[in-house]
Image: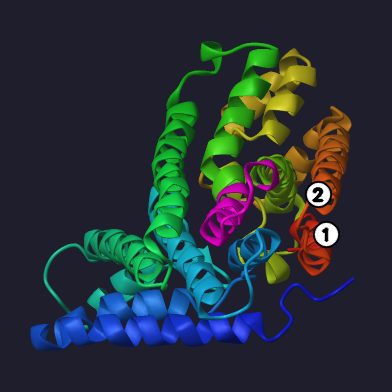
Amino acid sequence: MPDPFAADLRGRVQAQLDAEIARQQRHLDEMGPDVADLIDAISSLVRGGKRLRAAFAYWGWRAGGGEDGHVPVALASAMELFQAAALLHDDVMDDSDTRRGAPAAHRALAAAHAQRGWRGDADRFGLSGAILAGNLCLDWCDDLVVRSGLPADRLAAAWEVLERMRTQLMAGQFIDVVESMQPWSAADGAERVERARRVLRYKSAKYSVEHPLLIGAAAAGASPATREALSRHGLALGEAFQLRDDLLGVFGDPDETGKPAGDDLREGKRTVLVARAWLAADVAQRAWLEEHLGDPELDDTQVARFRELLTSTGAVAEVEAEITRLVDASRAALDEVAGLPGSRPEAVEALAELVELATARTA
């Protein structure tokens, strides 16, 4: 299998991001040093991560017939800025303390406020700064796509997918909040699993894999058949990717995930994993789950009990089986891409390798 980050894609994306931040900094120079906190928050965040969304955009372009060059790297870098915006806002909404093993942006900004002895509420300052930094990332994502060098018709095709990605992610974030706030009686039985799957699809799966793939493919002028097969490949893989992430959120090693073990449980995430456990649990187990899910003071002993409950109810095994089914579906769709006219073997092989990376059992 080829390395999907061959030709130093990670390095090229980082160089593009550094250049974009420097370009945007010039717009801010006249405003003085007070805005440096915003730039620092963004710069720190875009220096980490797996670059999976960048890789999907790049190989979507190549699968659609595009050649290597500046354009796919610009599109790939735009996906990283979009991801940064999502993470900045997500950490605010989830009240997360860490991101990638370091303080989340709103926590770092609050700490800076306190260290400087400023007036007012340090936490409110941190939240405000992180939200605004996320908004800047959204703006800069758009700027990179517009200035990528695409001809007008290709830009319009890519922009249509970008619009859908932005709109569905924001609404997906909201339905995640809605689900976490509703009483347990709001859904019952299999409906609870389907509602959890809806959140998974629109909050994560589409913007993590399917939409970056389609932005690259549309920009390259891919045929409708190629785009349709890539869409099915990306959606199935995106759902498998998020299911794996949900498992890691409970069972993963904090040194690898960059977040404390059990954070998803403390945040009250009603994931497919949790929904399946609730569905299979007895009355006493359901009562304990409902009482403790979303408790910010959940300790290691309670996290261990959650792990035992999730395992003993068969929820972990069911999610693992679903990941396998989705990965198989994503590979079948990729096989269809490989059989279409104009197929690029190197792109199909790189996307096949990304399947393994996206669903690995480690972070």
Residue 107 position by quadrant: bottom left
Which segment is the magenta one?
A: 208-226
Residue drawn where x is 60% and y is 37% of the image:
200
Q: Is residue 294 visible?
A: no
User: Is residue 83 one of those drawn in magenta?
Assistant: no
Q: Position of residue 252 (x, y in %)?
A: 75, 57
On the rendered image, what quadrant is the N terminus found in? bottom right
| Type of amino acid at the residue the image marks with label 2 | Leu
On the rendered image, what quadrant is the C terminus found in? bottom right
For the image shown, how many numbered marks are present on the structure?
2
Residue drawn where x is 79% and y is 56% of the image:
355
Q: Which residue is mark 2?
A: 334
Does residue 299 appear to the left or right of 243 in the view shown?
A: left
The image shows residue 55, relative to residue 262, as above or below, that is below
Task: Check if mark 1's residue and mark 2's residue have beta carbons within 8 Å.
Answer: yes
Q: Which residue is mark 1?
A: 352
The image shows residue 145, relative to residue 289, as above or below, that is below
Q: Residues within 10 Å of mark 1 (few under 14, many from 20)?
A: some
Q: Position of residue 136 (x, y in %)?
A: 29, 66
